């Protein structure tokens, strides 16, 4: 069980970041700049190999939207997979986005645009080039503060079903957290099961941890 103090601290921080995000208008330059930085990252990974599978996300509420970057990646021949929540306490499943992002239908508790789930995490990770992970904040070490459901941790954390842990001789995708610059370098309690990313992309560019 996680400590009460840690839980309260994370709750407060989540509220603060959500509230700041809600003040960033839809046409704020940081939003389009972050989308462009994600595009640039996808293009640089695509240059390393002909075919690229990407794990991404369909933004909700005031999260940074990467729709344009994902539509462009698909047009350029990448395959884009999105997370699907199958139940509280369950790891994520994944489905391929085969239409423009804006044509996907919002579903479930949080109104997230989700495709039909077809792939589990173990299978997805084995052939993935890039994982774009949403977060409310990432520390300078790559620790992630998520929305609090524990979904990414149960899926990709060190104790999850498909850990993104680097080991010699094992293929793993580059994992990149996505958040606004003001949210990068945050300090918050970190638990043993928490997912860590290799890099963080903000509107200012890519930061490797
Ligand atoms: N775009 C996107 N897709 C995603 C995630 C995400 O963070 N972003 N997830 C990442 O795991 C999963 C869905 N998990 C989520 C968990 C909680 C909330 C959420 O907003 N929860 C509460 C606030 C919780 C609280 O602090 O009390 C809410 O309804 O406002 C959203 C998504 C899978 N897909
Ligand atoms: N591997 C795991 N096994 C069991 N429980 C877990 C695991 N990972 C996380 N949890 C549970 O999930 C809860 C939420 O974790 P945490 O606050 O780290 O979520 P988060 O990373 O912010 O959420 P999300 O990934 O959904 O955005 C924790 O209270 C913890 O008990």
Image (cartoon, rainbow, N blue to C red):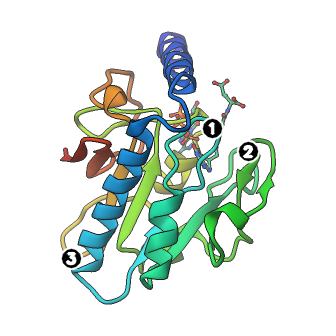
Q: Which of marks 1 and 2 is nearer the N terminus?
A: 2
Residue 140 vertical placement versus 77 (above, below): above
Left or right of 13? Residue 206 is left
Q: Residue 88 carries which label?
A: 2
Q: How far apart are marks 3 and 1 (CA)?
A: 32 Å
Residue 181 quadrant: top left
In three-dimensional space, the C-alpha distance between marks 2 and 3, rounded to whole angstroms, equals 34 Å
Mark 1 C-beta closer than 8 Å to ligand 2: yes
Q: Quadrant of residue 150?
A: top right
Tag 1 and tag 2, C-beta contact below 8 Å? yes
- The residue labelled by disc 1 is 149
Please name the residue shown 71% across and 71% down the image. Answer: 117
Residue 93 can be seen, yes or no: no
Marks 1 and 2, how far apart at CA: 8 Å
The residue closer to the viewer here, 22 or 32, is: 32
At a point 45% along the width and 51% down the height, the residue shown is: 133
In the displayed structure, does residue 139 sit left or right of residue 83?
Answer: left
**Residue 169, which numbered label?**
3
Q: Earlier in the sequence, mark 2 or mark 3?
A: 2
State which quarter of the image contains the N terminus.
top right
- The single residue placed furthest to the bottom in the displayed view is 50
Tag 1 or tag 3, which sits nearer the N-term?
A: 1
102 up-or-down from 135: above or below: below
Q: Which residue is drawn at 76% across and 51% down?
A: 87
Image coords of residue 81 (percent x, y) = 55, 70
Q: Where is residue 96 in the image (x, y as percent from the top left)?
A: 61, 75
Residue at 33 percent across and 67 percent down: it is: 42
Q: Which marked residue is nearer to the observer: mark 2 or mark 3?
A: 2
């Amino acid at each position: 069980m996680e400590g009460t103090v840690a839980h309260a601290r994370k709750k407060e921080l989540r509220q603060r970041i959500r509230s700041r995000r809600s003040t960033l208008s839809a046409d704020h330059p940081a939003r389009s700049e972050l989308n462009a930085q994600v595009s640039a990252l996808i293009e640089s990974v695509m240059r390393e190999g002909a075919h690229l599978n990407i794990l991404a996300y369909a933004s909700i509420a005031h999260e940074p939207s990467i729709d344009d970057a994902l539509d462009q990646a698909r047009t350029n021949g990448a395959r884009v997979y999105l997370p699907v929540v199958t139940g509280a306490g369950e790891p994520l499943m994944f489905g391929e986005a085969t239409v423009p992002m804006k044509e996907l239908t919002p579903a479930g508790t949080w109104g997230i645009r989700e495709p039909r789930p077809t792939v589990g995490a173990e299978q997805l990770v084995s052939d993935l080039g890039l994982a774009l992970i949403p977060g409310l904040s990432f520390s300078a070490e790559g620790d992630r503060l998520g929305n609090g459901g524990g979904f990414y941790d149960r899926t990709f954390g060190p104790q999850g079903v498909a850990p993104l842990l680097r080991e010699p001789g094992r293929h793993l995708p580059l994992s990149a957290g996505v958040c606004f610059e003001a949210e990068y370098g945050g300090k918050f309690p970190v638990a043993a099961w928490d997912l860590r990313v290799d890099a963080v992309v903000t509107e200012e560019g890519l930061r490797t941890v």
